Structure formats: C-alpha cells, structure tokens
Image: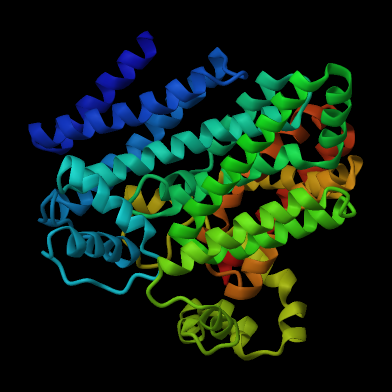
Amino acid sequence: MLAEVLALLAVAAGTLWAFPLLQAMQMTTALTVAYLVARSYYARCCHACMGGRVVLLLAALWLAAIAVPFVHHATLGSGATFTMPALYNDAARYYDWALAHYDGSAVEPTVTFWGYPLMIVGLWRVLGVSIIWPVALNVMMTLLTIVLTGQLAARVVTTDQRRTATVAMAMIAVQAFFMSQGAQMLKESWVYLAITLIAYSLVPLSRSEKQEIRSKRQEAGSKRQSRHYSLFIFHYSLFFVGCFVLAAVRAKYVNFIFIAIVMLAVAGRLRQWRYYATLLMLTAVCWWMGMAMTDNYTIVQQVNNVTGQGGMDAMFPAQGAYHSLLGDYYHYPLWKKLLYLPITCGVQWVIPFPWLPAGSHASWLGMVPRLRLGWYVLSGVVVYFYIFVSWRRNLQWMAWAWFPMVCYVGIAYMTSGTVSRYILAFEPWWMVLAAVTVLTCWRQRRFRIFMGVYLLLIVTLLAICHQV
C-alpha cells in the first residue's frame, strides 16, 4: 500500500511538471483508475501474490513514464492543445476520424478498421474530448493484458502456478517495444488483449484437458457435469469477446484464428469436432462483423499487398540496404519468397535495432522501443522452447504452442519482415512459453549452453547490421 501511494505521488509530480493543473489532475486520475482496474482484476485471480502485485505496479509506472511524455509531446511540446493534439500517421487518422464522428470538427480520413476510433467516440461522449482519455484507456488495456498473461501462464501448468504467472508477467512487462506501443494513441493494446483472451480461451480445449473433464464428469455425476458445461460456455464467451475485439480493430488477424482452430482440430484428429465447428462459426460471425466495420479492406486488397499491387512495394525501397539485399521482393513468385523466409523472419525477429538511425533526433519516445535487451534474451528462451520442449506434450498442446510462430512466419512472408509491430500481440503468448521453459530448464546444462550461443549469435548479427 505504501509503495502504491509513493507511486501515485511520483505520477502526480510528473504530470504537474509536464501539464497545467487541470490536465495534470485529469492525467493522474485517469492513470490511477487504469491501474486500479487492473489491480482489482489481479486481486481476484487464483495466482495473485505479492510478487505479482509488485510487477503490476512497476509495469503501471513504466507505462506512465511513456504515456505522460507522449501526451506532452503531442500537446504542449508541439504547440497544440489537448483537444487538437499534433499526432502523426495512424494516431492522427484515428483521432481525426473520432473527431469527425463526434462533432464534425475534423475532416474524416480514411481508416481501414474504425472499431478503435469508434471506441474513442464513445469514451468522449462520457468524459469529453481530450487525448488523455484514450491514452489512459490504452494503458489500462495493456495492464489487463499483463495480468491475463499471468493468468494464462497459471492455466497451462499444473504446479507452481503463482511463480509461473509472476515470471510471465515480469517477462512481458520488460518488453519495451511492446509496452511503448501500448501506451500511445494506437490500437495495439486492444489487439494485445484480444489475442491473449483468445489464447486463454483455447487452452481448456486441448485434448488432454477434455479427457480429464470427461473423467471428472463420470466420477462426480450430473451436478459436476453441469458445472463443466458452464465452464465451456464461459470459455466460448471469452473466445467470442476476443475475436470480436480483434475483428473490430484489426480484422485481418481474424484470418489467423481460423488457422488456429484448424491446427487444433487436426492435432486432435477431429475427435471433438463439434467444439471446433462451434469455434469456427463464432470466428466467422466475428469476421463478418469486422468486415462491416471497415472502409476499404478486402481479401483482394490483402492479396494485392502480398503480390506487389497494394502499395507496400512502393515503400520497400526506403529500407535501403535491406532492399538492396532482397531486391524486388513483393513481385517475386511464391517459391522465391519462401526461399527468403529465413532472412525475412530473422529481420523481423531483431528489429527495431537498439540504436537510432543516422541523422535522427534522440528523444525518450524514440529510444524506448529500442530498449531491446529484454527481447533479445527472452526470445532465445522462446527458440529453445520450440526446439527442445514443445514436442514433449500431446499434439494439441503442440498446435496451441506453435500457432503464434505460424502467425509470425505468415506476417514475415506478407510484409518482408519490415513491420515488427504486427508481431507484438503474440509476445504475451511467447512469454508464457518462456516462463514455463525457464522454470523447468534453467538448471540444465544444455539450456545454459544454448542461451550463451544464442546471445553470441544475436550480438554478432547486430554488429553486422550496425555496420551495413
């Protein structure tokens, strides 16, 4: 409690230094509410402990240290106001779309998926127009994702759940790129929460757990059977909520969920086909609703982006040396792009590089996404998991664990590995796998040798890239 009071005083001091009194009070209150909502949810989790509360508090301070400078830079630091901030790229389009639909004070821009700015409009209807509210809401979504990451970690293990959950929460909280995108005027925090909800809802549908539930039903009778049916309905509801949010803010990711269900169904040899048919139906409904909340996205457009007819090929030459290495990537045939997958996947794995581009202006907001030490270390644990650990359980567990990596490869194929922001939503999934791996393998000599070799390779690769 004392630590939380001190943290609140620190946030209040930071906002008073950055903003006038009224906006400082609004920012402090909004960030405090965001933390208290996540803390209240965490307190009701079965894996809640003192260590997890410390991690959550530090994560909230970490997000506040990003959100406050971001709001300051977009308002007073740029000579703008809190109702008409100076934003760029996607953030500017979301804000202007919301303003256009709120009171018509801005020209409506083209927004591919308008679920996120529509949520901003609803927020403004309650609290009034200000950049503070949507940024604080994104902070809350990111904190809830951190808590749900711990809950997911506790769900996939049968022993030492509290420690596994706390480690997973700490691992995702130290991912600076992940945290930086979740505390700005972007929809990433909503994608984080949606993907993690889907991951959590799919865990109980593994074959081994279903067999365990069936045996418990036979032993406990109809009352226990009714309880387990309720649990399945609960997880279906979580799945639907996750899919709906995902469809509203980035509907193209719903295509990946179809792949996840098919992977799980095939791994389970279609023995529980009714469950997977229900999930496919729910996913199709969410996909249809997502298509109703888009202005200009179609499957044809996505195919055009991959085949060099959608505009990404025009932006690719800006990649400099990487473009020189890959050449006219977006116009290559399928087989040639597949040959380049090791390169595109490798680049996507390490960017953004932990240094600023030559000639760029150094700033806190520009440096935060490049604090990559946490990712470079823990990504090695993820690789170790896939090579040595993932095959130790049943096939459906393997399908569940490998799904984010399948998505990773698909994104690298479609974007030539240059948009690493698109893989951030899968990092909570990976950090759960990393937490399980670290707690079970850290004493093994093979694990320590592998991590040493992996880090040496990463350092070598970064040194080469820095010289290019």
Spot occupied by residue 20 in the image (x, y as percentages of width and height):
8, 36
Question: What residue is at 72 percent from the left and 39 percent from the top?
Answer: 203
Residue 215 versus residue 265: which sits nearer the camera? Answer: 215
Side of 17 relative to 202 (left or right): left
Q: Give how far across and how far down residue 382 sits, in percent.
A: 73, 45
Toward the front, the furthest residue is: 222
Q: Farthest top residue?
A: 2
Residue 203 appears in the figure: yes
Q: Is residue 327 above or below residue 260?
A: below
Residue 358: give x, y in percent of width and height. Answer: 41, 67
In the figure, is residue 244 to the left or right of 220? left
Quadrant that contains the N terminus: top left
Total tally of numbered discs in the picture: 0
Q: How is the image coloured?
A: rainbow
Quadrant of res 431: top right
Q: Is residue 381 above or below residue 346?
A: above
Residue 463 in view of the camera: no
Closer-to-camera residue (282/209): 282
**Residue sitting at x 67%, y 31%:** 231
Residue at image coords 42%, 50%: 181
Q: Nearer the viewer, residue 374 or 31?
A: 31
- x then y, percent, for residue 228: 73, 28
- Which quadrant of the rendered structure holds the C terminus? bottom right
Quick check: 320 left or right of 345? left
> Which quadrant of the structure image shows residue 321?
bottom right
